[in-house]
Image (tube, rainbow, N blue to C red):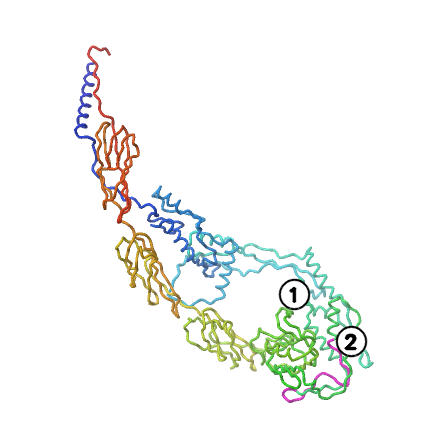
Amino acid sequence: MNYLKNVLKRGAALLLLLALLVSVFGCTKSEPQPSEPTPATGTFLAGTKLNGIDLSGKTPEQAAALLKQTAEDYTLQVTLDGVLFRLDAARLGLAYNEKTDLAALLTAQEADASKLTFEDDALFTFADEDTLRTALLTGRTEALAQQPPESTDETEPTEPSEPEEEVLQLDDPTRAHLLFDTEKGEFVGVDGAPGLSTDYTEAVAKVQKALRTLTRWTVVRSQQKQVADGEKAEGNARLAKAVEDANSYLNISLSYSFTPDGKDTSYEYIDRDRIAQWLLIQSDGLTIELNREAISTYVNGVVQRHSVGGSPVQFKTTYGSYISLNSYRGGQSVNGDALYDDIIDCLSSRTGGSRVAKFNAAQAGGGVEDYGGSYVELDLTNQMAYCYRNYKLVISSPMISGSPYYDCATPGGVYTIKSKDSNRYLTGPGYKVWVQTFMPFNGGIGLHDCNWHSVFGGTRYFYKGSHGCINLPPEVALTIRDNVSVGTHVIVYGGIYNVQGKNQIWTGTEHYNVTPDATPFKLDMRADDNAVLSGYTSSDPSVCTVTSDGVVTVVGEGTCTITIESEGTVIYYNDEKTVTITVAKLGQTITAKDSLTLRPGDKASAEAGVSTGSALSYTSSDPKVAIVGADGTVTAVGYGTCTITVSAAETPKYKAAEKKITVTVEKKAQQLTGTATYNCKTGDAAFRLDVTALDGAALRYVSDNPAVCTVDAAGNVTVVGEGTCTITVTAAETADYQKGTFTVTVTVAPAATEPTVPSESENP
């Protein structure tokens, strides 16, 4: 017991000694330690990236402007099935999503300074899948239509490519359709053909992924594994109706009797085989149309076979020579126009039976006919058309008649204008063309304007002739129309030009890449056998023009095609050749720093250069932040962010170019120093904090636990109770320094008390 009393006495003495020390020396403190710089509020921290885009030092407003401009300037380099092309933001429908809450991202970062990377799938909006698919296909098609451009000093980043797979040429599935079965002698329905369907789903998905992060290039492929079946004929009601309609023509039995001048009757029988030759299956595979040119050719033969007696009419040509025409006098000739119209009516109405052919009225024999001095004269040999009115030549012109090479030679004879049609389509096997005027004179054969040929006459008709009609320059056809009437005679004579059967061989440059400042140059394309080059035409005179001898003058940027016509020789047909001319300015590449971080008053060089050696100019988006000299020296003026634009002006040879440099001018980081830790006892006297800041920045003090300690505006600390409190000292932003903070930790222990010692009389 005495031992315990002694221990208690010694413990009380020790506590008393500690209390005396505290009363003499006050609160204990650690050595002053400088604080770490505190990041500035209101801007994203250095290294901050949103979808991979650097937002360092940007306010939410500045970040939004950067993201918007980045989207507008974006270009995606795509390799689709081995073909390289580029798609800009407009074609992709790419735009910055204005609803993005960048302020919320900044708030999250201020709460957690370690968060530097953000992802947002909705940061950018872009076109839907169908539009992106169309953009891919259009871009690939356009790239394939162009020759590779001339090499330049410009380089593009490329992604390591995967091993290329063979890309199939795909055929779409075909629908069930009509077909004439020669063995059965009738029309039948056949199955459509299956084909490989192309799926671009994965390609579009990869493009969408690139757009979310604005990746600059991607390699995509179509999927060609899906097999689509062709439409079936069996059970196809639509096809069955088309078959029934087509075969209804073949069920017609039609014959014509010819009895001129009471002589023996002769006949023409039109059977199903001949009718089958007069039927054309249209591009939809279901519709039948009459081949009127073929019917005209048949009628011309009938006229020759069944016209009797008389002598051929003599006609004086434009050349002064006389020719015999198959317009007999002194006999009777079959009325070909009436026969043609009757055949068309019978077929259209599905009416058959035995018919009696009509004959023209008998005429006096032989003689010379001038047709009243008003007629159209067509010379097939020389491919010339002449129009006379009242014995006066109104107009003459080269023409293009039916092609004998394709068995479509225009038949000779004497005919009359049946009608003068305006603004209509002419249709036939494999063609549908719009004409301003059409003047039929022999069934479905007539005179009409033609704007798809630039050269007329010569031997062009042999391999590029019509289906029997007379093709004329538009102004010639309209002039003839205005000078003929229904009933005006058309005299057709002449024969086939004897052309050898070989295609032309061309040598020379087929594709030119030139700049807009190119001097006029002569095409070097040549045709073999010294063939005469009869004409040059430009597809787009706003890009380039060409003279009659092949000298090209560049007018503007773009692509034009020069078509060169050659006349036939004893070895080669007439022919044409196209030469492509691409006019485009070359690019300039500007190199410079991407960004500069400066303090007010600092100077730095943009270190800009240009591949062409052109003069450079500089502009600042905000001279209050930074200015730039003519030599590219950037001087920091105030705080904030601005953009320095380095520009190379457009020249006759080069495109304009620019490079943007982001300049950030920052205030200095504040440095606060003072005592960071205090250890006190309850009852201690108040004390003043010794924290100081640079540039005399005003200080503000806040205690997080007033139950332990309080602090006034001057930094005087009053101990209140036991525990720990943290005092945050904030230095206000100054002209040259950022806002900064410093924390002081105050620990308060209970004050020592005099221990109570039990008296000796007391019993335990």
Tell me the quarter of the picture where residue 285 sits: bottom right
The quadrant in which residue 181 appears is: bottom right
Left or right: residue 676 compared with residue 593: left
Query: Is there CB contact under 8 Å for labels 1 and 2?
Result: no
Is 319 covered by the magenta stretch?
yes
Q: Residue 760: within the magenta?
A: no
Disc 2 secondary structure class: loop
- For label 1, the SS is loop
Horizontal and vertical percent position of residue 580 = 48, 71
Could you tell me residue 223's position as x and y percent? 52, 55
Q: Nearer the viewer, residue 720 or 501?
A: 720
The answer to whether residue 348 is above or below residue 457 is: above
Q: Quadrant of the N terminus?
A: top left
Q: Which residues are magenta?
A: 317-337
Residue 139 lies left or right of residue 435; in this view the side is left
Residue 267, x across and y down, in percent? 78, 75
Name the residue beneath numbered marker 1: 282
Question: Could you tell me the amino acid type at mark 1?
Answer: Gln
The percent coordinates of residue 672 (x first, y second) are 24, 42
- Residue 601 versus residue 242: which sits nearer the camera? 601
In space, the residues marked 1 and 2 are separated at their CA atoms by: 31 Å
Question: How many residues crowd mark 2 within 10 Å: few (<14), some (14–19), many (20+)?
Answer: many
> Would residue 712 be found to the left or right of residue 536 on screen?
left
Which callout, 1 or 2, points at the residue further toward the start of the chain? 1
Q: Residue 651, which numbered label? A: none
In percent of the image, x 46 and y 52: which residue is there? 125
Specify the amino acid type for callout 2: Ala
- Read off the residue under disc 2: 357
The front one of 710 and 544 is 710
Q: Is residue 731 above or below residue 761?
A: below
